[in-house]
Amino acid sequence: MDGDPIVVVLTERVSDPHLAGLRADGVSYIFAGNETIDLASAVDRIARELDVKTLLVEGGGTANGAFLRAGLIDEISVAICPAIDGAAGAPSLFHSGEADADGPAPLTGLTLTRHDILPGGEIWLCYRVENADK
């Protein structure tokens, strides 16, 4: 993608034709879990095998929530833009599935580490995440 390598994280249940398609397109892949993606395993393998020191999660609320619940986020960077939506069901920054909806994420706190006012009135906030299990 724009000259950068792509690595797809898959479960071991992926079909052989899908793997063949990835190989034909020159896309690398790793397995992390049998039936569901094990995010901690995926991050560990990416760090070890690809020597990645920093991983940017730029997902929607569901992906962000999964990484947060897995204790894999150590920093949150968020820009607040001057816009109002107000629509029912609008996207959230961190979303929990129904199985996790009744419990809090496993973190003990957030510490503001940086803040800036950007052109156009946006506010950029960065927080260090203090995970409960670390």
Image (tube, rainbow, N blue to C red):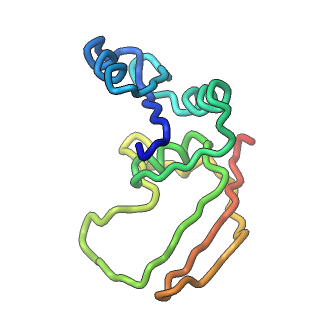
Judged from this view, the residue extending furthest toward the top is: 16
Q: Number of labelled discs? A: 0
At horizontal 45% and vertical 25% (from top left) the residue drawn is: 28
Relative image position of residue 122 (x, y in whole percent): 50, 82
Image quadrant where residue 55 sits? top right
Nearer to us in this view, 46 or 113? 46
Image quadrant where residue 130 sits? bottom right
Apparent side of residue 35 relative to residue 127 in the rendered image (left or right): left
Apparent side of residue 101 relative to residue 49 in the rendered image (left or right): left
At horizontal 45% and vertical 29% (from top left) the residue drawn is: 9
Relative image position of residue 121 (x, y in whole percent): 49, 88
At horizontal 31% and vertical 15% (from top left) the residue drawn is: 20
Relative image position of residue 24 (x, y in whole percent): 32, 20
Relative image position of residue 109 (x, y in whole percent): 69, 60
At horizontal 49% and vertical 36% (from top left) the residue drawn is: 5
Nearer to us in this view, 90 or 19? 19
Quadrant assignment for the C terminus? top right
Above or below: residue 134 compared with residue 126:
above
Above or below: residue 33 compared with residue 97:
above
Quadrant assignment for the N terminus? top left
Apparent side of residue 134 relative to residue 2 in the rendered image (left or right): right
